[in-house]
Image (tube, grey):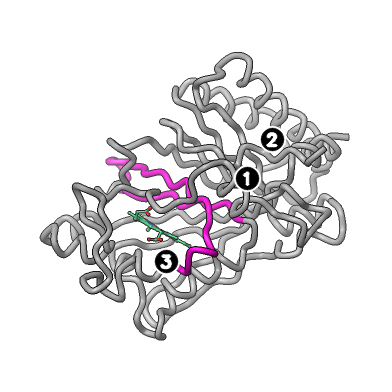
């Protein structure tokens, strides 16, 4: 039987909670981790039964340091490492610590909240929650900057599995997925001050219609020109916008699942360093990466084995 992936290939739901947890020093973490693995499986099974049509899922990713501290299987997934910052002349994709990442999706905020609360209750004695972002579907799937986000994602079960899941190149981890996240804050005041035609030149698509600009019109430093690394190299993006007026933090939680991290890295290099060098992604003049962490989302079968 094929290994059963976590729900990494699901489409966006209406609500999402993203959480990053870091283990405390000098505490035993193995038993808590075992119980968390069992809980993640339980939350997904329960969701299929209770809310089959509500897009509910809970995906857990494990970072490189945590993998080693927990003495999980060695050799590790081939490309699992601590993310190394990508620095261009002007902008940097920073690297931040993350032991466990949770991606909680559901059409109602109640179920996302309940899943987050159940996980937190178990984790609190052994770990600290260092990041929590509540993402929501903004109109017809738009980023908070007003452009539809996700259009050029792979579509259909086969294509999504091909680009989203590890294959036979790393048999021990077949069905797993590299999970990369970045929390971006946008300078919305500056972005909105631009005429819409200029905003469109930054993304490389028309704002209302979501139609892609023809190649001879699309600027070489637009986001879609630089992030597109070819039809044979794609990733599954599940970005969600968030907004907090009191903190004046409006942003995009970028989240990608991929069969290989090298594809994500290629996109980051082109966006931050530029292609050719210096021709960096103009979207970065209005967006700052505050976090950046690589995780691995093992299959449900592996989580079951980890649960002891
Ligand atoms: C395309 C938004 C960061 C990879 C797009 C599009 C939007 C968008 C609006 C056009 C519609 C679509 O195809 O989805 C954003 C925002 C970001 C962000 C607001 C955060 C500031 C990133 C990062 C990567 C990335 C960090 C990769 C590491 C892509 C790819 C495409 C895309 C591969 C499709 C390009 C194509 O084939 O035309 N993004 N994005 N994006 N983005 Fe991003």
Q: Residues within 10 Å of mark 2 (few under 14, many from 20)?
A: many
- Residue under pointer 1: 21
- Residue under pointer 3: 227
Q: Quadrant of residue 89?
A: bottom left
Question: Which is nearer the N-term, disc 1 or disc 3?
Answer: 1
Contact (CB < 8 A) between labels 3 and 2?
no
For marks 1 and 2, give the CA distance.
8 Å
Q: Is residue 187 magenta?
A: no
- Above or below, 80 against 217 in this view is above
Q: Quadrant of residue 299?
A: top right
Which quadrant of the rendered structure holds the C terminus?
top right
Q: Which mark is residue 291?
A: none
For marks 3 and 2, give the CA distance.
36 Å
State the residue at coordinates (72%, 55%).
Answer: 167
Q: Which residues are magenta?
A: 229-258
Q: Which mark is residue 123?
A: 2
| Count of marks, rendered view | 3
């Amino acid at each position: 039987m094929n290994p059963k992936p976590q729900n990494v290939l699901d489409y966006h739901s209406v609500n999402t909670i993203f959480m990053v947890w870091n283990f405390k020093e000098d505490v035993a973490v193995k038993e808590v981790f075992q119980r968390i693995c069992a809980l993640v499986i339980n939350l997904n099974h329960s969701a299929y039964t209770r809310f089959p049509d509500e897009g509910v899922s809970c995906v857990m990713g494990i970072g490189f340091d945590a993998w080693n501290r927990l003495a999980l299987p060695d050799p590790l997934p081939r490309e699992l490492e601590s993310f190394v910052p990508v620095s261009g002349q002007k902008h940097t994709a920073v690297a931040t610590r993350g032991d466990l990442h949770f991606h909680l999706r559901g059409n109602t905020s109640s179920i996302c909240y309940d899943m987050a609360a159940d996980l937190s209750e178990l984790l609190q004695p052994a770990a600290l929650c260092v990041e929590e972002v509540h993402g929501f579907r903004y109109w017809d799937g738009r980023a908070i900057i007003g452009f539809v986000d996700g259009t050029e994602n792979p579509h259909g079960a086969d294509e999504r599995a091909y680009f989203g899941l590890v294959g036979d190149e790393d048999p021990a981890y077949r069905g797993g997925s590299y999970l990369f996240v970045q929390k971006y804050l946008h300078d919305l005041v500056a972005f909105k001050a631009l005429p819409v035609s200029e905003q469109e030149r930054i993304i490389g698509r028309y704002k209302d219609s979501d139609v892609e600009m023809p190649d001879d019109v699309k600027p070489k430093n637009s986001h879609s020109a630089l992030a597109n690394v070819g039809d044979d190299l794609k990733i599954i993006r599940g970005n969600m916008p968030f907004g907090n007026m009191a903190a004046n933090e409006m942003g995009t939680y970028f989240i990608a699942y991929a069969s290989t991290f090298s594809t994500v890295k290629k996109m980051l290099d082109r966006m931050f360093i530029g292609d050719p060098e210096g021709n960096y992604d103009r979207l970065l003049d209005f967006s700052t990466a505050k976090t950046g962490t690589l995780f691995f989302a093992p299959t449900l079968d592996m989580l079951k084995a980890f649960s002891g």
